[in-house]
Image (cartoon, helix red, strand yellow):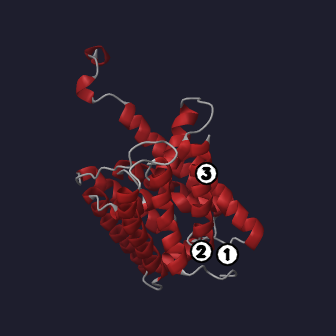
């Protein structure tokens, strides 16, 4: 219960920030991607820097997560093809619709009707990926199917 | 913008602290795609109730709704270059659906989106996240300039 309330509260702060900074707006995001405004990059860089410093302080000062008692730990990953291919597909959609998954949610909260179309596509994309992930690899399929 | 835009040097660090808070309280990575995926997977499994990540998504929507109630808005009318360029609602919706599929499938394949890879992943200097972030910024910028040249 406490873990869900905490996650929800962090989500609320995230949602207010995306709304108040205007980053829910496709126009603000597009200005950033077209280098007409530095806001997107200053916002993004200051968020990364804060998280970078904060996580390092956290690892030294708080060995265990307050609500779950789990050791505070994370793993890094080596880049694979899927990271680049996936990010390229994502970047194309991002450049066309001028939203990413956070702003899709905040646009819904702000009652933007166009967000319904983006959400429908986004959910379909996630479902397609989950379906592909769950499907057994071709070589492992029983011979029966080829039958 | 009708409402004053929150200064980047406040908004950015507050979002960075959300990443830290997620680790400090729950030892979880902050990411919007993971939050959406949690809700979608549980709905597919006909499961009652959401996990912590699903609750973060509910908070995200609620935070934006709360901002709407307090500040009014949204601060934009129409939908950027799409409504400036096209008149057909059906065409614009179709473009947004296709872009949405690319965003959803691409983010899952890449293991995160702007928040999961771009923010949480780069903050721990994960090489996969750095590669993904460089890629989506490059393609997002390139696509925006191509669209600008075409319209």
Label 2: few (<14), some (14–19) or many (≥20) C-alpha neighbours in 10 Å? many
Q: Nearer the viewer, mark 3 or mark 1?
A: 3
At mark 2, the secondary structure is: loop
Q: Looking at the rendering, which quadrant does residue B10 occupy? A: bottom right
Asked whether the beta carbons under mark 2 and mark 1 sit within 8 Å of each other, the answer is yes
Label 1: few (<14), some (14–19) or many (≥20) C-alpha neighbours in 10 Å? many
Taking the view exactly as shown, the residue that stands out farthest to the front is A61
Residue under label 1 = B75
Q: Nearer the viewer, mark 3 or mark 2?
A: 3
Q: Earlier in the sequence, mark 3 or mark 2?
A: 3
Asked whether residue B92 appears in the rendered view, the answer is no
Do tags 2 and 1 sit on the same chain? no
At mark 1, the secondary structure is: loop
Residue under label 2 = A22
Q: Is residue A68 above or below residue A122?
A: above
Q: Position of residue B143 (x, y in %)?
A: 39, 71
Q: Residue at x 70, y 82 (%)?
A: B2
Q: Nearer the viewer, residue A54 or B96?
A: A54
Name the chain letter of the residue that bears numbered label 3. Answer: A
Residue under label 3 = A8
Do tags 3 and 1 sit on the same chain? no
Left or right: B130 as drawn, with respect to A27: left
Indicate the quadrant containing the N terminus of chain B: top left, top right, bottom left or bottom right.
Answer: bottom right
């Amino acid at each position: 219960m406490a873990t869900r309330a905490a996650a929800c509260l962090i989500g609320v702060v995230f949602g207010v920030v995306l709304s108040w900074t205007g980053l829910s707006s496709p126009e603000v995001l597009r200005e950033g991607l077209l280098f007409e405004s530095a806001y997107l990059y200053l916002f993004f860089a200051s968020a990364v820097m804060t998280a970078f410093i904060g996580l390092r302080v956290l690892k030294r000062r708080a060995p265990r997560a307050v609500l779950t008692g789990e050791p505070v730990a994370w793993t890094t990953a080596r880049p694979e093809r899927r990271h680049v291919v996936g990010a390229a597909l994502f970047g194309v959609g991002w450049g066309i619709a001028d939203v990413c998954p956070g702003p899709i949610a905040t646009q819904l909260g702000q009652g933007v009707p166009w967000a319904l179309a983006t959400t429908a596509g986004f959910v379909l994309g996630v479902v397609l990926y989950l379906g592909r992930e769950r499907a057994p690899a071709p070589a492992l399929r029983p011979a029966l199917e080829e039958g | 913008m009708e409402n004053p835009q929150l200064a980047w040097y406040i908004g950015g660090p507050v979002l960075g602290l959300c990443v830290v808070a997620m680790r400090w309280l729950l030892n979880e990575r902050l990411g919007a795609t993971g939050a959406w995926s949690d809700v979608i997977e549980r709905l597919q499994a006909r499961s009652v109730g959401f996990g912590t990540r699903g609750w973060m998504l509910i908070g995200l929507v609620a935070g934006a709704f709360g901002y709407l109630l307090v500040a009014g808005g949204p601060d934009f009318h129409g939908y950027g270059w799409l409504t400036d360029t096209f008149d057909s609602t059906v065409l614009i919706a179709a473009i947004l659906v296709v872009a949405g599929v690319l965003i959803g499938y691409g983010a899952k394949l890449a293991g995160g989106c702007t928040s999961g890879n771009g923010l949480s992943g780069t903050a721990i200097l994960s090489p996969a996240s750095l590669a993904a972030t460089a890629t989506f910024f490059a393609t997002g910028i390139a696509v925006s300039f191509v669209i600008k040249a075409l319209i």
